[in-house]
Amino acid sequence: MLDTQVRRYVIVGNGFAGTTAAEQLRKHDPTCEITLFGDEPYPLYNRISLPPMLRKQIPEAKVMMRTEAWHEEHGIALKLRTPVERIVPEDRVVVANGVSYPYDALLIATGGRPNPIGAPGSEGAHNLFNFQYLDDTRAISEHLETAKVAVAIGGSYIAYELAEAFSTRKVETHWLIRGPRFLHRMLDEAAGAYVDAAAKADGVHMHYGEEVAGFVRSNGVATKVRTKSGLEIDADCYGVGFGLTMNVELAQAAGIETSKNGIVCNDELETSIPGIFAAGDIADFFDPILEMRYRMGTWNNAGAHGKVVALNMMGGSQKYHDVPEYSSLLFKGQTITQFGLSPDLQPEIETAYKIDAEKQWYRALYFWQDRLVGGLMLGKGNRAGKRKYVEAIKAKERYPKPEWDALLDWTA
């Protein structure tokens, strides 16, 4: 006899990974039941569109990717403002608002939450923001309407996005970085100098080696930031980019294996408990191409995870096989493209690099045990050869060290 049982899927987290998985499940199984939980009051929106929204280069309507009506049309039960309280693997249910939702396969795509700055005077300051969610973007944008001076704090991509938005909005901008340069675990001194020049060309005041000691407060508002070196900056708006803490608590309480990076899963994105999967930022997954475990917090990676994990939730055995990539403008004068692994993810990586001072280009290739595993291209127009590099990574090509410099000249 044919198995006519309707499959039940539960997805915790309605970001790009979770919503993509729900869409793929519906595409491949028209009769299944899908329940999708989200903490925020919004259906899926495009997080990589939040910076241009903050810069007032696109309207909020362009950020929204799905509507509640879309979920209804696709038979996806969307539960907004509904945190999941617990997972009960032995009963194959999740519990939210006291209601049990049974599942045949469960996906955890809970991502991470921004780290607070934690400095004295920061807690509860009405004009000090993290930058992760749509509501953050709205609040920062409102403050920038009247702000004269703004401060971005941190050496991360998020801190860069804040600094660029502040300067684009014609607000005097200061950028405080505790380390010696932007992305100092990935960029060396030469690459950092190009980013520094691009920031200063946009009028950003750069402050390196500066760690925040605290804030001066008045009526619930931060009026001044002080650093441990004694630097003081009076400002109207402060933005913090200190990375993310992964939302692993739900998984941990259910007995699912976690690590310092997220939820541990295999190359099919299945966790230590059969039938429970993880995807997106939260997944500490084994990559069969790079042959190592890591976590990749990029938008493209989340979407690719969503497609793969949906097939495996249905009983497939699809392995994640993409090489993660990231591209961004860096102020008006620079661009950055990064693919594969980088030294911040694997400390044993060795680097070969090349500088074209005339074009202000920087190119680095990353090798691990003589295998090409990643690279970085800095500079407008400096993307030639990327596809060939990605194919070499997928092919697990090995190159003796004397050949590394020649690879930097690939253009095809």
Image: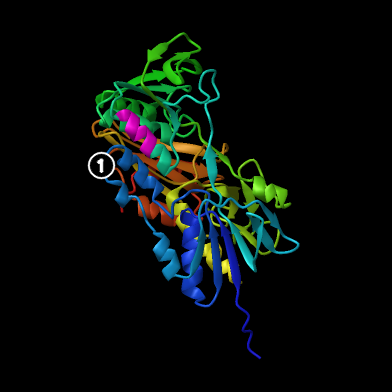
The single residue placed furthest to the right in the displayed view is 90
Q: For the residue labelled by badge 1, is the local secondary structure a helix, a strand or a loop?
A: loop
* Residue displayed at 45% across by 40% down: 132
* Residue displayed at 42% across by 37% down: 136
149 or 317, nearer to the observer? 149
Residue for badge 1? 57
Q: Quadrant of residue 363?
A: top left
316 or 80, nearer to the observer? 80
Residue 39 horizontal side relative to residue 50, left or right: right
* Picture coordinates of residue 81, whole percent (x, y): 52, 50
* Picture coordinates of residue 372, whole percent (x, y): 48, 48
Magenta stretch, main secondary structure, is helix
The single residue placed furthest to the top in the displayed view is 230
The single residue placed furthest to the bottom in the displayed view is 1
* Residue displayed at 26% across by 27% down: 202
Q: Which residues are magenta?
A: 138-144
405 or 275, nearer to the observer? 275
Q: Amino acid at mark 1?
A: Gln
The quarter of the rendered structure image containing the N terminus is bottom right
Let me know if residue 295 appears in the view: yes
Q: Is residue 313 above or below residue 285?
A: below
